[in-house]
Amino acid sequence: AQSVSQHNHHVILSEAASLELGCNYSYGGTVNLFWYVQYPGQHLQLLLKYFSGDPLVKGIKGFEAEFIKSKFSFNLRKPSVQWSDTAEYFCAVKRGVSGGYQKVTFGTGTKLQVIP
Amino acid sequence: EAGVAQSPRYKIIEKRQSVAFWCNPISGHATLYWYQQILGQGPKLLIQFQNNGVVDDSQLPKDRFSAERLKGVDSTLKIQPAKLEDSAVYLCASSLDGILGETQYFGPGTRLLVL
């Protein structure tokens, strides 16, 4: 079945460690890719997105993600995490479907816990 | 600009009761989405509106769930009757036109507990 996969369900890191969260999808054709973050007690909010052009996308708070089309991947990275990055991270894929509208599918999320 | 508003924030009901959730999207946003997020899972799209028309309700359990967006602005999602497995956070989101590349903005969600 077509899907969005986040293989890491729970990640625990110490402050200053590097982060990489995996996201793979199985849709062909043109896609837009998003990473959303949900801090404890807050709304889902956009971290970064890929629409077109440079496959290396920079987002807020020092996050970046690289779109590798051949691998159907859009992994999220940060060179040095902080305690305030503790949150749940969701990958999402938007694609065109029959009827001319756009459909968004979310991954299951990765909980990141950063230990001071 | 004001964000996506949802109410109530929390709701506890017994199974077989009815419940309704309300969403007011960002002003001028044509596309409105309702998602269900069960604990430990990612948001699952229930229904997507473009103005007041439905463009995708393929994952909406239509025997018990209904949604409307009569004037193309705010929307209500109803569950009747509720089941235990409906316990989840119901998220509303909106975007300007629903086109590729566009960002969705999420509301705070309504946390539903069915006992």
Image (spheres, coloured by chain):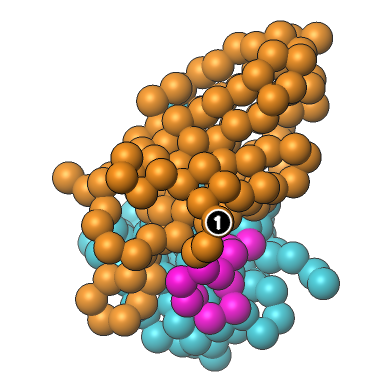
Q: Amino acid at mark 1?
A: Asp
Q: Chain B is shown in which shade?
A: cyan
Toward the viewer: B77 or A86? A86
Q: Is residue B81 visible?
A: yes
Identify the residue at image location x=34%, y=64%: A30
Disc 1: which residue: A54
Taking A19 as reference, is B82 left or right? left
The segment highlighted magenta reads B95-105
Q: Position of residue A47 (x, y in %)?
A: 65, 47
Q: Position of residue B65 (x, y in %)?
A: 34, 62
Q: Quadrant of the N terminus of chain A?
A: top left
Please tell me whether residue A24 is drawn above or below residue B105 in the rendered image.
above
Identify the secondary structure beneath mark 1.
loop
Toward the viewer: A30 or A95? A30
- Whether B97 is among the magenta residues is yes
Q: Position of residue A9 (x, y in %)?
A: 46, 22
